[in-house]
Image: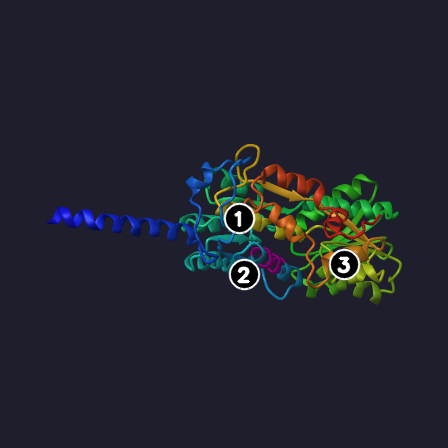
């Protein structure tokens, strides 16, 4: 009797099993949040892929994003950029401010991991705690990419050698940034300069100072003094003290846009407005206005681009297609800066400071992602950094006229 019953119900089980397979194959939705394991990621081809991207490009990940602080326009913009890109690429984010302390930064990484994020878009502004944060991520099996504030070369080298969850880093080439501003000042005929910037030990400021000083001196200029501030509130007084002792100086280099108002105030108080050129690095929505009205002679920018590109490196890792450099390691990517002055300020502002417009287009971002472009490789990133992030290249991507 049982043999007869088995023969009768076997076809029914077969039909049910077939239906289950079809349903599970078609059941992927935008809320799926798988994480790529290091072993799976490591086995993916790092330099090229002939396989097609996943059948669905709607897999959504939850990403933790930190900012060094809140209420500072430049820092807020870094976080905004990351959140925007992950949204474009189909993922969700949670965000936290480090409140300008390494301890809070480390705590935020721990909290992100405890909250079950699939990945971290990390700005390692605390510098000294990078390896600690990386270990936290590794313990939680959470991949992380570093952007803009990338810690020390030595620490990143350790991560590339030993941490399988380290995706890579991307930042503005800060030494080159300082050199670019020095070249602009020299070309304008300046032979003397003073420098105004943030804390000693702030890697961003230190590297720009290094680049500017090396280039300005090599081209025959003299740096008379530099004043470093804990924050922008100290800039007016420190700039005035420095300029009072160097009233014949020809150029002031503000190493970030936050310090331009302090330089402007000091020059005005000393009756030097119009007699001393102001230059800056890291042009943003606020400091761009000073270039447009002629208060600032020129600046260098490219600072924000890394915060747009970093999410694509993380997404590729999570999708099982990590980008590796020519040596098979997590890539160390650096973008160059470009000059912003009265000749191109309107074009610059049209894509960098206009609400609702982002300098790197959505199509450019998707071209860096395997889920949209199965041909993406490390070389795709190199080519973009070499020639695709100039102001004119970005204008062209927006179908806008080029300048200069």
The 10 Å Cα crowd at callout 2, few under 14, some 14 to 19, many 20 or more, is: many
Q: Is residue 64 left or right of residue 13?
A: right
Q: Residues at badges 1 and 3 in contact (C-beta under 8 Å)? A: no
Q: Any mark on residue 349, and which?
A: 3
Measured in 3D between alpha carbons, the distance from the residue under mark 1 to the one under mark 2, in whole angstroms, is 21 Å
Q: Is residue 241 at least partly visible in the picture?
A: no
Report the magenta residues as a range: 78-86
Residue, disc 1: 314
Whole-percent x, y for residue 342 in the image? 84, 55
Q: Quadrant of residue 356?
A: bottom right
In front: label 3 or label 2: 3
Q: Is residue 137 at least partly visible in the picture?
A: yes
In this rendering, the answer to whether 155 lies above or below 399 is: above
Whole-percent x, y for residue 91 in the image? 52, 56
Residue, disc 2: 98
Task: Identify the coloring.
Answer: rainbow
Q: Residues at badges 1 and 2 in contact (C-beta under 8 Å)? A: no
Magenta span has 378? Answer: no
Dot 1 or dot 3: first in sequence order is 1
């Amino acid at each position: 009797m049982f043999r007869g019953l088995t023969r009768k119900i076997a076809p029914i089980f077969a039909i049910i099993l077939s239906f289950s397979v079809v349903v599970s194959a078609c059941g992927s939705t935008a809320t799926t949040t798988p994480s790529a394991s290091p072993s799976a990621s490591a086995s993916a081809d790092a330099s090229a892929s002939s396989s097609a991207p996943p059948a669905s490009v709607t897999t959504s990940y939850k990403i933790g994003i930190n900012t060094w602080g809140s209420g500072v326009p430049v820092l807020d913009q870094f976080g905004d950029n990351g959140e925007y890109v992950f949204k474009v690429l189909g993922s969700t984010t949670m965000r936290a401010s480090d409140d300008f302390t390494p301890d809070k930064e480390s705590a935020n990484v721990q909290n992100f991991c405890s909250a079950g994020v699939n990945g971290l878009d990390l700005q390692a502004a605390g510098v000294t705690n990078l390896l600690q944060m990386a270990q936290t991520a590794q313990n939680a099996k959470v991949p992380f990419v570093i952007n803009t504030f990338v810690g020390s070369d030595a620490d990143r080298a350790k991560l590339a050698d030993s941490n399988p969850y380290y995706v890579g880093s991307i930042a503005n080439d800060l030494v080159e940034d300082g050199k670019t501003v020095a070249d602009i000042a020299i070309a304008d005929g300046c032979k003397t300069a003073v420098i105004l910037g943030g804390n000693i030990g702030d890697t961003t400021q230190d590297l720009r100072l290094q680049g500017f000083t090396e280039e300005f001196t090599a081209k025959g200029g003299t740096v008379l003094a530099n004043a470093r501030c804990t924050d922008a509130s100290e800039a007016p007084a420190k700039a005035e003290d420095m300029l009072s002792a160097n009233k014949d100086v020809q150029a002031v280099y503000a190493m970030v846009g936050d310090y331009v108002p302090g330089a402007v105030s000091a020059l005005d108080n000393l009756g030097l407005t119009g007699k001393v050129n102001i230059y800056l690095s890291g042009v943003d929505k606020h400091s761009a206005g000073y270039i447009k009205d002629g208060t600032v002679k020129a600046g260098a920018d490219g600072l924000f681009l890394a915060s747009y590109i970093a999410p694509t490196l993380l997404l590729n890792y999570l999708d099982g297609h990590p980008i590796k450099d020519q040596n098979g390691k997590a890539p160390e990517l650096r973008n160059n800066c470009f000059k912003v002055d009265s000749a191109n300020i309107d074009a610059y502002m049209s894509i960098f400071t206009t609400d609702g417009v982002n300098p790197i287009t959505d199509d450019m971002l998707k071209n860096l992602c395997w889920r949209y472009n199965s041909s993406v490789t490390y070389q795709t990133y190199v080519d973009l950094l070499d020639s695709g992030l100039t102001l004119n290249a970005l204008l062209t991507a927006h179908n806008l006229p080029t300048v200069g």
